[in-house]
Image (cartoon, rainbow, N blue to C red):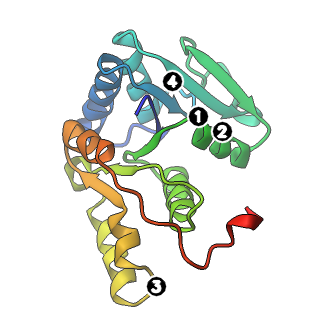
């Protein structure tokens, strides 16, 4: 993977381990020459990932909708900035510019991005790896809810297993690099895409 979109919080939260791991992830991207594609913020977990990449002399592409573009939010040292008309266009460009997706702790916005990109994968609209970096068990309850969806017949086990999870950066990158995509759903009308 030459570029990875990272979905994560624009707040720092209250867990110092999450903050330090976000920075370390960015540093790892820079050292491995993986371009960071993210929401362009200098604040929160987003800012920490970008700081790590930039301090390791890496490449950072920020994508932000125009209504959020302010000096207080946008990172001033990005390699490239794309300003979109709206949130949906932002997600589409993040998808187009990335070889994979990684989810770090965040709030509603992060969950929105995670569920949309996993839904696209489930529908066969992409075959890119999606990874969750489960720092300090942040996603344990979300993963338990996903198990409940499987148990109650709302989610197929293979679609859940298509999302790779690890609590270490190197472990997650290895799983994402070895990702085997699901076959396209048989019912999918590819001619209509």
Q: Residues within 10 Å of mark 1 (few under 14, many from 20)?
A: some
Between the residue at mark 3 and the residue at mark 2, the CA separation in whole angstroms equals 29 Å
Q: Residues within 10 Å of mark 4 (few under 14, many from 20)?
A: many
| Location of the C terminus (image quadrant) | bottom right
The image shows residue 118, relative to residue 24, as above or below, that is below
Residue at image position (20%, 48%) is 167
Sequence-wise, the earlier of marks 4 and 3 is 4
Q: Residues within 10 Å of mark 2 (few under 14, many from 20)?
A: some
Sequence-wise, the earlier of marks 3 and 2 is 2
**Residue 89 seen:** yes
Between the residue at mark 4 and the residue at mark 2, the CA separation in whole angstroms equals 19 Å
| SS under mark 3 | loop
The percent position of residue 169, horizontal first and vertical second, equals: 24, 38
Residue at image position (52%, 60%) is 121
The percent position of residue 27, horizontal first and vertical second, equals: 30, 21
Residue pointed to by mark 2: 93
State if disc 4 and disc 1 touch (CB < 8 Å): no
| Location of the N terminus (image quadrant) | top left
Between 83 and 10, the one nearer to me in the picture: 83
Residue 42, disc: 4
State if disc 2 and disc 1 touch (CB < 8 Å): yes
Residue 154, disc: 3
């Amino acid at each position: 993977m030459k570029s990875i979109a990272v979905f994560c919080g624009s707040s720092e939260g209250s867990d110092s381990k999450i903050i330090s791991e976000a920075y370390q992830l960015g540093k790892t991207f820079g050292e491995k020459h993986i371009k960071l594609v993210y929401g362009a913020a200098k604040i929160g977990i987003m800012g920490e990932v970008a700081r790590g990449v930039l301090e390791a002399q890496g490449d950072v592409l920020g994508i932000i909708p125009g209504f959020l573009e302010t000096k207080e939010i946008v990172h001033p040292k990005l390699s490239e900035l794309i300003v979109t008309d709206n949130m949906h266009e932002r997600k589409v460009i993040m998808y187009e510019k990335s070889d994979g997706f990684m989810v770090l702790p965040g709030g509603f916005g992060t969950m929105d991005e995670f569920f949309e990109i996993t839904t696209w994968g489930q529908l066969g609209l992409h075959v890119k790896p999606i990874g969750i970096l489960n720092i300090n068990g942040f996603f344990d309850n979300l993963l338990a809810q996903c198990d409940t969806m499987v148990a109650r017949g709302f989610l197929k086990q293979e679609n859940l297993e298509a999302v790779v999870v690890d609590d270490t950066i190197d472990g997650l990158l290895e799983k994402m690099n070895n990702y085997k995509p699901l076959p396209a759903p048989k019912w999918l009308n590819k001619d209509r895409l």
